[in-house]
Amino acid sequence: MLEGLISIHREVMANIPVTYHRYLFDQINWSAKAICIYGDRGVGKSTLIAQYLLEKYKTPDKALYISADNIIASSMGLFAIAQEYFSYGGEALFIDEIHKYDNWSVEIKNIIDTYKNHQIVFTGSSSLDLKKSKGDLSRRVVYHRLVGLSFREFLQLNDNVKLSTYSLEDIIQSHVQISNELHIKNILKQYRLYLNHGYYPFYLEGQEDYLSRLNNVIEKVIYEDISVIYNLKVSTTLILKKILWLVASAKILMPNIDNIARNLQVSREVVYNCLEYLDRAGLIHNLYPEGSGMKLVRKPGKILLNNPNMLYAINGTLNLNSDIGAIRETFFTNQIATKYKVNTYENGDYIVNDKYVFEIGGKNKSSRQIKAEANASLALDNIEVGFGNKIPLYLFGFLI
Protein backbone atom coordinates (compact mmCIF):
# COMPACT_ATOMS: atom_id res chain seq x y z
CA MET A 1 0.00 0.00 0.00
CA LEU A 2 2.95 2.31 0.61
CA GLU A 3 3.71 2.19 -3.11
CA GLY A 4 0.22 3.53 -3.84
CA LEU A 5 0.73 6.45 -1.44
CA ILE A 6 4.09 7.26 -3.01
CA SER A 7 2.45 7.30 -6.45
CA ILE A 8 -0.20 9.75 -5.20
CA HIS A 9 2.53 11.85 -3.58
CA ARG A 10 4.36 12.22 -6.89
CA GLU A 11 1.20 13.22 -8.73
CA VAL A 12 0.28 15.86 -6.15
CA MET A 13 3.80 17.33 -5.99
CA ALA A 14 3.98 17.64 -9.77
CA ASN A 15 1.21 20.24 -9.68
CA ILE A 16 2.44 22.40 -6.78
CA PRO A 17 3.42 26.01 -7.67
CA VAL A 18 6.83 26.84 -6.27
CA THR A 19 7.42 30.43 -7.38
CA TYR A 20 5.40 32.21 -4.69
CA HIS A 21 5.25 31.65 -0.93
CA ARG A 22 2.41 32.88 1.26
CA TYR A 23 3.13 35.27 4.16
CA LEU A 24 3.10 32.43 6.72
CA PHE A 25 5.83 30.40 5.03
CA ASP A 26 8.66 32.51 6.45
CA GLN A 27 7.03 32.89 9.87
CA ILE A 28 7.01 29.16 10.65
CA ASN A 29 9.85 27.51 12.52
CA TRP A 30 10.05 24.55 10.19
CA SER A 31 12.60 22.82 12.41
CA ALA A 32 9.86 22.01 14.93
CA LYS A 33 9.13 18.29 15.17
CA ALA A 34 5.34 18.64 15.04
CA ILE A 35 3.58 21.45 13.16
CA CYS A 36 -0.09 22.04 12.44
CA ILE A 37 -1.30 24.52 9.80
CA TYR A 38 -5.00 25.20 10.31
CA GLY A 39 -7.50 27.59 8.81
CA ASP A 40 -10.50 27.96 6.55
CA ARG A 41 -11.15 25.86 3.49
CA GLY A 42 -9.51 27.03 0.29
CA VAL A 43 -6.86 29.37 1.74
CA GLY A 44 -3.86 27.32 0.54
CA LYS A 45 -2.75 25.11 3.45
CA SER A 46 -2.04 22.10 1.22
CA THR A 47 0.12 24.16 -1.11
CA LEU A 48 2.02 25.67 1.81
CA ILE A 49 3.12 22.36 3.32
CA ALA A 50 3.84 20.86 -0.10
CA GLN A 51 6.12 23.77 -0.98
CA TYR A 52 8.14 23.22 2.17
CA LEU A 53 8.30 19.46 1.54
CA LEU A 54 9.68 20.04 -1.97
CA GLU A 55 12.16 22.64 -0.77
CA LYS A 56 13.47 20.71 2.25
CA TYR A 57 13.10 17.01 1.43
CA LYS A 58 12.54 16.98 -2.35
CA THR A 59 11.76 13.25 -2.81
CA PRO A 60 9.24 10.81 -1.25
CA ASP A 61 11.97 8.59 0.14
CA LYS A 62 12.71 11.41 2.64
CA ALA A 63 9.26 12.91 3.20
CA LEU A 64 5.82 11.60 2.23
CA TYR A 65 2.64 13.59 1.57
CA ILE A 66 -0.69 11.87 2.24
CA SER A 67 -4.28 13.06 2.50
CA ALA A 68 -6.07 11.81 5.60
CA ASP A 69 -9.29 11.15 3.68
CA ASN A 70 -7.55 8.95 1.10
CA ILE A 71 -8.97 5.42 1.10
CA ILE A 72 -5.51 3.91 1.64
CA ALA A 73 -4.92 6.11 4.68
CA SER A 74 -8.34 5.22 6.05
CA SER A 75 -7.87 1.47 5.63
CA MET A 76 -4.22 1.27 6.63
CA GLY A 77 -4.30 3.81 9.49
CA LEU A 78 -2.04 6.81 10.07
CA PHE A 79 0.09 5.17 12.75
CA ALA A 80 0.62 2.06 10.61
CA ILE A 81 1.62 4.26 7.65
CA ALA A 82 4.11 6.13 9.80
CA GLN A 83 5.47 2.89 11.23
CA GLU A 84 6.07 1.34 7.81
CA TYR A 85 7.32 4.51 6.14
CA PHE A 86 9.80 5.39 8.86
CA SER A 87 11.09 1.80 8.93
CA TYR A 88 12.18 2.32 5.32
CA GLY A 89 14.18 5.43 6.20
CA GLY A 90 11.58 8.16 5.77
CA GLU A 91 12.28 11.30 7.78
CA ALA A 92 9.00 13.23 7.73
CA LEU A 93 5.28 12.68 7.22
CA PHE A 94 3.02 15.43 5.84
CA ILE A 95 -0.67 14.72 6.47
CA ASP A 96 -3.30 16.87 4.77
CA GLU A 97 -6.90 17.40 5.97
CA ILE A 98 -6.37 15.63 9.26
CA HIS A 99 -9.82 16.53 10.57
CA LYS A 100 -11.37 14.06 8.11
CA TYR A 101 -9.73 11.14 9.89
CA ASP A 102 -11.57 9.61 12.85
CA ASN A 103 -9.74 9.80 16.19
CA TRP A 104 -6.93 11.70 14.49
CA SER A 105 -5.56 13.43 17.60
CA VAL A 106 -4.85 10.11 19.36
CA GLU A 107 -2.95 8.69 16.39
CA ILE A 108 -0.98 11.91 15.86
CA LYS A 109 -0.06 11.89 19.55
CA ASN A 110 1.11 8.27 19.28
CA ILE A 111 3.19 9.00 16.17
CA ILE A 112 4.84 12.02 17.81
CA ASP A 113 5.59 10.14 21.04
CA THR A 114 6.90 7.03 19.27
CA TYR A 115 8.98 8.67 16.52
CA LYS A 116 10.64 11.52 18.36
CA ASN A 117 13.37 12.01 15.76
CA HIS A 118 10.98 12.35 12.84
CA GLN A 119 8.91 15.31 11.71
CA ILE A 120 5.11 15.42 11.50
CA VAL A 121 3.40 18.27 9.63
CA PHE A 122 -0.38 18.26 9.26
CA THR A 123 -3.21 20.53 8.17
CA GLY A 124 -6.88 20.89 8.99
CA SER A 125 -9.38 22.58 6.72
CA SER A 126 -11.52 23.57 9.69
CA SER A 127 -10.16 25.07 12.89
CA LEU A 128 -13.23 23.82 14.75
CA ASP A 129 -12.12 20.29 15.54
CA LEU A 130 -8.47 21.26 15.87
CA LYS A 131 -9.26 23.73 18.65
CA LYS A 132 -11.35 21.13 20.46
CA SER A 133 -8.44 18.70 20.30
CA LYS A 134 -5.60 20.99 21.35
CA GLY A 135 -5.76 19.75 24.94
CA ASP A 136 -4.04 16.48 24.06
CA LEU A 137 -1.49 17.98 21.69
CA SER A 138 -0.79 21.50 22.96
CA ARG A 139 2.59 20.53 24.48
CA ARG A 140 3.60 18.54 21.42
CA VAL A 141 2.42 20.56 18.41
CA VAL A 142 3.14 24.10 17.22
CA TYR A 143 -0.03 25.58 15.69
CA HIS A 144 -0.14 28.21 12.92
CA ARG A 145 -3.27 29.72 11.40
CA LEU A 146 -3.31 30.51 7.68
CA VAL A 147 -5.83 33.04 6.39
CA GLY A 148 -6.79 33.98 2.84
CA LEU A 149 -4.83 36.30 0.60
CA SER A 150 -4.39 39.86 1.83
CA PHE A 151 -4.77 42.65 -0.72
CA ARG A 152 -0.97 42.99 -0.67
CA GLU A 153 -0.51 39.32 -1.58
CA PHE A 154 -3.13 39.62 -4.32
CA LEU A 155 -1.15 42.50 -5.85
CA GLN A 156 2.09 40.54 -5.63
CA LEU A 157 0.59 37.55 -7.41
CA ASN A 158 -1.02 39.66 -10.12
CA ASP A 159 1.87 42.03 -10.81
CA ASN A 160 4.83 39.84 -9.79
CA VAL A 161 6.17 42.58 -7.51
CA LYS A 162 7.61 42.61 -3.99
CA LEU A 163 5.56 44.69 -1.56
CA SER A 164 6.23 45.39 2.11
CA THR A 165 3.89 44.82 5.01
CA TYR A 166 3.11 47.60 7.49
CA SER A 167 1.94 47.70 11.07
CA LEU A 168 -1.33 49.41 11.94
CA GLU A 169 0.67 52.21 13.58
CA ASP A 170 2.70 52.66 10.37
CA ILE A 171 -0.48 53.02 8.33
CA ILE A 172 -2.06 55.49 10.75
CA GLN A 173 1.04 57.66 11.07
CA SER A 174 2.59 57.39 7.59
CA HIS A 175 -0.24 56.52 5.21
CA VAL A 176 0.45 59.43 2.84
CA GLN A 177 4.08 58.40 2.40
CA ILE A 178 3.18 54.73 2.02
CA SER A 179 0.55 55.46 -0.65
CA ASN A 180 2.95 57.66 -2.60
CA GLU A 181 5.68 55.02 -2.55
CA LEU A 182 3.56 52.07 -3.70
CA HIS A 183 3.63 52.86 -7.43
CA ILE A 184 0.89 50.34 -8.21
CA LYS A 185 -0.88 51.12 -11.47
CA ASN A 186 -4.68 51.36 -11.19
CA ILE A 187 -4.59 50.37 -7.52
CA LEU A 188 -8.25 51.20 -6.92
CA LYS A 189 -9.27 49.03 -9.88
CA GLN A 190 -7.13 46.20 -8.51
CA TYR A 191 -8.70 46.72 -5.10
CA ARG A 192 -12.19 46.31 -6.57
CA LEU A 193 -11.09 43.12 -8.33
CA TYR A 194 -9.76 41.81 -5.01
CA LEU A 195 -13.09 42.48 -3.31
CA ASN A 196 -14.79 40.31 -5.92
CA HIS A 197 -12.37 37.42 -6.37
CA GLY A 198 -9.05 37.90 -4.58
CA TYR A 199 -9.26 36.30 -1.14
CA TYR A 200 -8.86 32.62 -2.03
CA PRO A 201 -5.76 31.53 -4.00
CA PHE A 202 -7.84 29.28 -6.24
CA TYR A 203 -8.86 32.39 -8.21
CA LEU A 204 -5.61 31.75 -10.11
CA GLU A 205 -7.19 28.60 -11.56
CA GLY A 206 -9.88 30.65 -13.33
CA GLN A 207 -11.88 33.74 -12.50
CA GLU A 208 -14.91 32.82 -14.61
CA ASP A 209 -16.12 30.12 -12.23
CA TYR A 210 -14.50 31.52 -9.08
CA LEU A 211 -17.70 32.60 -7.31
CA SER A 212 -19.37 29.30 -8.19
CA ARG A 213 -16.44 27.41 -6.69
CA LEU A 214 -16.57 29.62 -3.61
CA ASN A 215 -20.25 28.77 -3.13
CA ASN A 216 -19.25 25.10 -3.28
CA VAL A 217 -16.64 25.72 -0.57
CA ILE A 218 -19.29 27.38 1.61
CA GLU A 219 -21.64 24.42 1.13
CA LYS A 220 -18.88 21.97 2.09
CA VAL A 221 -18.06 23.93 5.26
CA ILE A 222 -21.70 23.82 6.32
CA TYR A 223 -22.50 20.23 5.39
CA GLU A 224 -19.14 18.46 5.74
CA ASP A 225 -17.41 20.43 8.50
CA ILE A 226 -19.80 22.08 10.92
CA SER A 227 -22.64 19.57 10.72
CA VAL A 228 -20.35 16.54 11.02
CA ILE A 229 -18.04 17.86 13.73
CA TYR A 230 -20.92 19.01 15.91
CA ASN A 231 -23.20 16.12 14.96
CA LEU A 232 -26.01 18.49 14.00
CA LYS A 233 -29.50 17.53 12.89
CA VAL A 234 -30.48 18.32 9.31
CA SER A 235 -32.91 20.93 10.62
CA THR A 236 -30.10 22.74 12.48
CA THR A 237 -27.88 22.64 9.39
CA LEU A 238 -30.65 24.40 7.46
CA ILE A 239 -30.77 27.07 10.21
CA LEU A 240 -27.04 27.63 9.73
CA LYS A 241 -27.59 28.29 6.05
CA LYS A 242 -30.54 30.62 6.66
CA ILE A 243 -28.53 32.67 9.16
CA LEU A 244 -25.61 32.90 6.72
CA TRP A 245 -27.96 34.07 3.97
CA LEU A 246 -29.47 36.62 6.40
CA VAL A 247 -26.02 38.08 7.12
CA ALA A 248 -25.19 38.26 3.42
CA SER A 249 -28.44 39.94 2.42
CA ALA A 250 -28.51 42.49 5.27
CA LYS A 251 -26.79 45.82 4.74
CA ILE A 252 -24.87 45.33 8.00
CA LEU A 253 -26.49 42.99 10.48
CA MET A 254 -26.89 44.33 14.00
CA PRO A 255 -28.66 41.25 15.28
CA ASN A 256 -31.86 41.10 17.25
CA ILE A 257 -31.60 37.56 18.55
CA ASP A 258 -35.24 37.40 19.63
CA ASN A 259 -36.46 38.37 16.15
CA ILE A 260 -34.10 35.95 14.42
CA ALA A 261 -35.18 33.10 16.70
CA ARG A 262 -38.86 33.92 16.20
CA ASN A 263 -38.56 34.17 12.41
CA LEU A 264 -36.64 30.89 12.20
CA GLN A 265 -38.91 29.23 14.80
CA VAL A 266 -36.03 28.09 16.99
CA SER A 267 -34.78 28.98 20.45
CA ARG A 268 -32.37 31.80 21.24
CA GLU A 269 -29.85 29.14 22.30
CA VAL A 270 -29.93 27.55 18.86
CA VAL A 271 -29.33 30.95 17.23
CA TYR A 272 -26.39 31.70 19.53
CA ASN A 273 -24.87 28.27 18.88
CA CYS A 274 -25.25 28.65 15.12
CA LEU A 275 -23.56 32.06 15.21
CA GLU A 276 -20.62 30.53 17.08
CA TYR A 277 -20.36 27.58 14.67
CA LEU A 278 -20.37 29.87 11.64
CA ASP A 279 -17.77 32.18 13.16
CA ARG A 280 -15.40 29.39 14.14
CA ALA A 281 -15.72 27.87 10.69
CA GLY A 282 -14.62 31.13 9.06
CA LEU A 283 -17.92 31.93 7.38
CA ILE A 284 -18.96 34.94 9.45
CA HIS A 285 -17.31 37.41 11.77
CA ASN A 286 -19.08 38.08 15.06
CA LEU A 287 -17.95 41.48 16.30
CA TYR A 288 -18.60 42.28 19.95
CA PRO A 289 -18.98 45.66 21.68
CA GLU A 290 -15.92 47.31 23.16
CA GLY A 291 -15.31 47.04 26.89
CA SER A 292 -14.08 44.32 29.22
CA GLY A 293 -17.50 44.09 30.83
CA MET A 294 -18.90 42.71 27.57
CA LYS A 295 -16.68 39.64 27.37
CA LEU A 296 -19.32 37.27 28.69
CA VAL A 297 -22.14 38.65 26.54
CA ARG A 298 -22.97 36.30 23.67
CA LYS A 299 -24.79 38.80 21.45
CA PRO A 300 -22.52 40.34 18.79
CA GLY A 301 -22.78 44.06 18.12
CA LYS A 302 -22.44 43.39 14.39
CA ILE A 303 -22.25 40.30 12.20
CA LEU A 304 -20.40 40.39 8.87
CA LEU A 305 -19.37 37.71 6.44
CA ASN A 306 -15.76 36.60 6.75
CA ASN A 307 -14.59 38.32 3.55
CA PRO A 308 -16.02 40.41 0.68
CA ASN A 309 -15.76 37.58 -1.87
CA MET A 310 -18.42 35.72 0.10
CA LEU A 311 -20.78 38.67 -0.25
CA TYR A 312 -20.51 38.54 -4.02
CA ALA A 313 -20.77 34.73 -4.11
CA ILE A 314 -23.81 34.34 -1.85
CA ASN A 315 -25.68 37.39 -3.06
CA GLY A 316 -25.07 36.24 -6.62
CA THR A 317 -27.00 33.05 -5.90
CA LEU A 318 -29.77 35.13 -4.32
CA ASN A 319 -29.82 37.60 -7.25
CA LEU A 320 -29.05 40.45 -4.86
CA ASN A 321 -26.61 43.33 -5.11
CA SER A 322 -24.11 43.55 -2.25
CA ASP A 323 -24.37 46.70 -0.14
CA ILE A 324 -21.29 48.92 -0.57
CA GLY A 325 -21.20 49.72 3.14
CA ALA A 326 -21.16 46.03 4.01
CA ILE A 327 -18.40 45.40 1.47
CA ARG A 328 -16.24 48.16 2.96
CA GLU A 329 -16.69 47.05 6.57
CA THR A 330 -16.21 43.39 5.68
CA PHE A 331 -12.91 44.18 3.97
CA PHE A 332 -11.71 46.34 6.88
CA THR A 333 -12.55 43.85 9.64
CA ASN A 334 -11.25 40.89 7.64
CA GLN A 335 -7.85 42.49 7.06
CA ILE A 336 -7.49 44.01 10.54
CA ALA A 337 -8.59 40.94 12.51
CA THR A 338 -5.73 38.83 11.16
CA LYS A 339 -3.40 40.65 13.58
CA TYR A 340 -5.45 42.83 15.91
CA LYS A 341 -8.43 42.75 18.24
CA VAL A 342 -11.49 44.44 16.69
CA ASN A 343 -14.64 45.56 18.55
CA THR A 344 -17.67 47.60 17.63
CA TYR A 345 -17.65 51.08 19.17
CA GLU A 346 -20.34 53.53 20.21
CA ASN A 347 -18.59 56.66 18.89
CA GLY A 348 -17.37 55.15 15.64
CA ASP A 349 -17.66 51.94 13.67
CA TYR A 350 -14.81 50.03 15.31
CA ILE A 351 -12.10 50.26 17.94
CA VAL A 352 -8.89 48.28 17.41
CA ASN A 353 -6.79 46.98 20.32
CA ASP A 354 -8.94 49.11 22.67
CA LYS A 355 -7.16 52.21 21.37
CA TYR A 356 -7.62 53.15 17.70
CA VAL A 357 -11.08 54.27 16.59
CA PHE A 358 -12.15 53.96 12.95
CA GLU A 359 -15.10 55.14 10.92
CA ILE A 360 -15.49 53.42 7.54
CA GLY A 361 -17.02 55.06 4.48
CA GLY A 362 -16.74 56.66 1.05
CA LYS A 363 -14.44 59.53 0.17
CA ASN A 364 -16.96 62.15 1.36
CA LYS A 365 -17.48 60.57 4.78
CA SER A 366 -17.67 63.12 7.59
CA SER A 367 -15.50 62.87 10.73
CA ARG A 368 -18.28 64.33 12.88
CA GLN A 369 -18.95 61.09 14.79
CA ILE A 370 -15.30 60.59 15.82
CA LYS A 371 -14.16 64.20 16.27
CA ALA A 372 -14.06 63.89 20.08
CA GLU A 373 -11.91 60.72 20.00
CA ALA A 374 -8.15 61.04 20.63
CA ASN A 375 -6.95 58.25 18.30
CA ALA A 376 -9.56 58.34 15.56
CA SER A 377 -9.24 57.91 11.79
CA LEU A 378 -11.44 57.64 8.74
CA ALA A 379 -10.84 54.61 6.50
CA LEU A 380 -12.13 55.84 3.15
CA ASP A 381 -12.98 54.09 -0.07
CA ASN A 382 -12.27 55.55 -3.55
CA ILE A 383 -9.20 57.59 -2.60
CA GLU A 384 -5.64 56.70 -3.63
CA VAL A 385 -3.84 59.04 -1.23
CA GLY A 386 -5.19 60.31 2.07
CA PHE A 387 -4.71 63.43 4.16
CA GLY A 388 -4.47 63.93 7.93
CA ASN A 389 -6.64 61.27 9.57
CA LYS A 390 -8.26 60.26 6.27
CA ILE A 391 -6.67 56.95 5.27
CA PRO A 392 -7.27 55.03 2.01
CA LEU A 393 -9.26 51.91 2.90
CA TYR A 394 -7.17 49.66 0.66
CA LEU A 395 -4.04 50.30 2.78
CA PHE A 396 -5.42 48.07 5.53
CA GLY A 397 -4.77 45.22 3.11
CA PHE A 398 -1.02 45.61 3.70
CA LEU A 399 -0.94 44.31 7.28
CA ILE A 400 0.15 40.77 6.27
Image (spheres, rainbow, N blue to C red):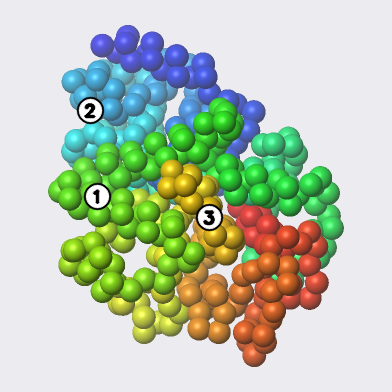
Residue on which the image places disc 1: 238
Cα–Cα gap, marks 1 and 2: 37 Å
Cα–Cα gap, marks 1 and 3: 22 Å
Which amino acid type is shown beneath numbered disc 3? Ser
**Residue 329 against residue 27 in the figure, above or below:** below
Q: Residue 307 location, x and y as percent?
A: 50, 53
Which badge, 1 or 2, is on the more N-terminal residue? 2
Which residue occupies the extreme bottom position in the image? 372
Residue sitting nearer the eye, 400 or 29: 400
Q: Residue at x 43, y 77 (%)?
A: 289
Which amino acid type is shown beneath numbered disc 1? Leu
Q: Residue at x 25, y 54 (%)?
A: 239
Which amino acid type is shown beneath numbered disc 2? Phe
- Label 3 SS: loop
Q: Residue at x 76, y 49 (%)?
A: 187
- Label 1 SS: helix
Residue on which the image places disc 3: 322
Which badge, 1 or 3, is on the more N-terminal residue? 1
